[in-house]
Structures are given as structure tokens and as C-alpha cells.
Amino acid sequence: MEEGSVFRSLLAILQWWGFNVTVIIMNKWIFQKLDFKFPLSVSCVHFICSSIGAYIVIKVLKLKPLIVVEPEDRWRRIFPMSFVFCINIVLGNVSLRYIPVSFMQTIKSFTPATTVVLQWLVWRKYFDWRIWASLVPIVGGILLTSVTELSFNMFGFCAALFGCLATSTKTILAESLLHGYKFDSINTVYYMAPFATMILGIPALLLEGNGILSWFDAHPSPWSALIIIFSSGVLAFCLNFSIFYVIHSTTAVTFNVAGNLKVAVAVMVSWLIFRNPISYMNAVGCGITLVGCTFYGYVRHKLSQQQQPGTPRTPRTPRNKMELLPLVNNDKLEGKG
């Protein structure tokens, strides 16, 4: 690999890490330090900022070509994806309100396991035994982390766990609903964020509107806090742009490893800022989970290399690589919230 290419890949990974960790920390800061305990509204702000940002990038600045989607496909294909997309982001923000960033990020690493199990149960898809074996350290690490978490909260834990299921469902839906459309992260946000805003806007207003008015009256500097909240929405969109950049600047293996290291960086930075207690065994569990995710990505890559084009299919052979190997880093289709 040329020196310039290496530098470009490293720069892409660092800016991706920077945006990702900053968005996570800012969201936790909003819930914990600003006492703005309204995850639906925070998610809605992020969707609004992402909708505007994607429009500017595609329509105004023309930095990315628009992938044209037929009007009927927008409701038949994009809307169901947007609904799950919305649930995924909301559950992530709900979990951040109740549990530490370190615990939330570790549980999120459970996504490969939930994706494989859902595809096996619902679609009866066959997976190589090495895929199942690679899930063992992920599941074991999650269990160890959960039983040793000093700041355990059942509601936050369930929100994070169901968030994994929502992410897996989104990945599975993407395979079928977006078939024929080669979406990137920017076009994904362009089509899904407006739908997500529409879906979430009324529930956020009805369930959290009065609470926000009370918070606005009680908070010593509400306008400064609102600037922080909307800034997190802008950064959430920038994260999607950085994901597009890093995917096109690195290999699949590098993307997988960098994604797992990103979780470790987020855990460390959050601990330095919020000082949430982490036991020794809890840290071990988190480490095992991340090693398991890296191993899963390695197995996925090796199997995809073995699946050569034109290989005859048997009744037990998946139709394509996506069926065999669901996404580890679901950031590809994720508008962070």
C-alpha cells in the first residue's frame, strides 16, 4: 500500500473515531450533565439536523450524487427501514440515559450474534460452523460484563439489547428492501431521516413536550444547553459523512478492526470524563467481547474470500455474501443518535 494511501486511511479512521466518540459523549453529557432527560426529543433533533445536512450535501453542494428511488419504493421500501432505523436510534439514546457509555457500547457489540440468530430463526439460513464458533466469545463477554456491571440498570440494559435487535432487523431488511439500490451512508440518511422525523415528531411532542417546557423554566442556562443539543445533531450528521469516507478509504478487514477499537476508545474516553465505576472483571468482559467481534470479522472475511463468483449453490448454500455474513459494523446504515 502506498504511503499516501496509508495516510489517507489513517486520517479517515481518526476522524471517524473523533466524530463517533464525540457524539456518544455529547449525548451522555446531555442526559447526565444538562439533565435533559428526553431521548425522543434528542433523537428527533438529530434526525432534523441529518435531514438538512444530507439535503445540503446532495442537492446544494452536490458532493454526492443522488440515488434516485421511485416514489412507490420510498413508501414500500424506505419507510419500513426508516421505522426500524428510528427505533434503533431511540433505543440507543434511551440506554445512554440509564447506563454508562462503557456498558452500552459493550452490549451494542452483541449485534453480530443477534443478526445471525434472527436470520437463522426467521429465514432458516445456513451459517458455517466457524461463524457460530466466533459468536461464543461475544456472548460470553456480554454475559460477564452484564453480571459484573456496577452501574447496572435493567431498563437501560433492555433498551440496549433491543437496540441490537433493531439494528439486526434493519440489516436484514436492508438486504431485501434495498435490493437493487446501492445505498451509501449519505443517501441512506437523505431518504430515511425525513421519514424518521415524521415518525418520531408527534410522539416526542406528546410524551416529552411538557417536560421540556418545565426543564426550560428550571434550567439556569437553557439556551446554552440547546446549542449543545443541536450541535450534537450536527455532529451526528457529520458522523454519517465520515462513515462514507472511511468505508471508501479502507479495506473491509481494516474497517472491522477499526470499528472494534473505536468501541475501546469510546469506553476509555467516557470513563475519563464521567468516571463511572468499572470493575476488573467488567473490563475483562468488555475486552473478551471486542476480541470476539474482531475474530468474527476475520472469519467473515475468510469465508467471503472462499465464496468465489460462480460457485454452484446447494440447498444449504446462502444466496450471497450478505446472507452468509451480516454486517459487524452497522455504522454503514446508521445515522447515529
Image (cartoon, rainbow, N blue to C red):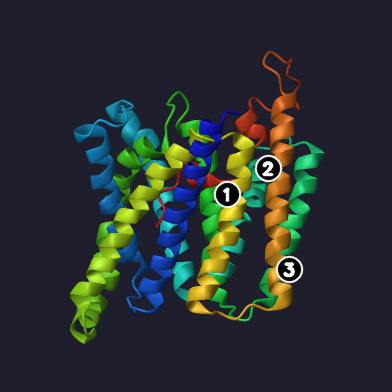
The amino acid type found where label 3 is placed reads Val
Q: What residue do we see at 25% from left, 73% from top?
A: 225
- Residue to which mark 3 is pinned: 284
Q: Using a 10 Å C-alpha cutoff, classify the residue at mark 2 as few (fewer than 14 neighbours), some (14 to 19) or many (20 or more).
A: many
Left or right position of 227 against 31: left
Q: Position of residue 34 (x, y in %)?
A: 33, 78
Report, in whole angstroms, how far the alpha carbon at label 2 lies from the one at label 1. Answer: 10 Å
Image position of 39 with respect to 236: above or below? below
Secondary structure state at the residue bearing disc 2: helix
Q: What residue do we see at 29% from left, 54% from top?
A: 234
Instruction: State which tag comes first along the sequence, 3 or 2.
Output: 3
The amino acid type found where label 2 is placed reads Gly
The circle on residue 259 is 1
Q: Is residue 44 visible?
A: no
Q: What residue do we see at 25% from left, 60% from top?
A: 202
Q: Are marks 2 and 1 in contact (CB under 8 Å)?
A: yes
In what quadrant of the picture does the N terminus appear? top right
Q: Position of residue 8 (x, y in %)?
A: 49, 37
Q: Position of residue 97 (x, y in %)?
A: 44, 73
Between 78 and 297, which is closer to the camera in this rendering?
A: 297
Q: What residue do we see at 72% from left, 23% from top?
A: 307
Instruction: State which tag comes first along the sequence, 2 or 1.
Output: 1
The circle on residue 297 is 2
Report, in whole angstroms, how far the alpha carbon at label 1 lies from the one at label 3. Answer: 19 Å
Dividing the picture into quarters, in which one does residue 23 lie? bottom left
Image position of 102 with respect to 333: above or below? below
Secondary structure state at the residue bearing disc 1: helix
Q: Which tag is nearer the camera, tag 2 or tag 1?
A: 1
Q: Using a 10 Å C-alpha cutoff, classify the residue at mark 1 as few (fewer than 14 neighbours), some (14 to 19) or many (20 or more).
A: many
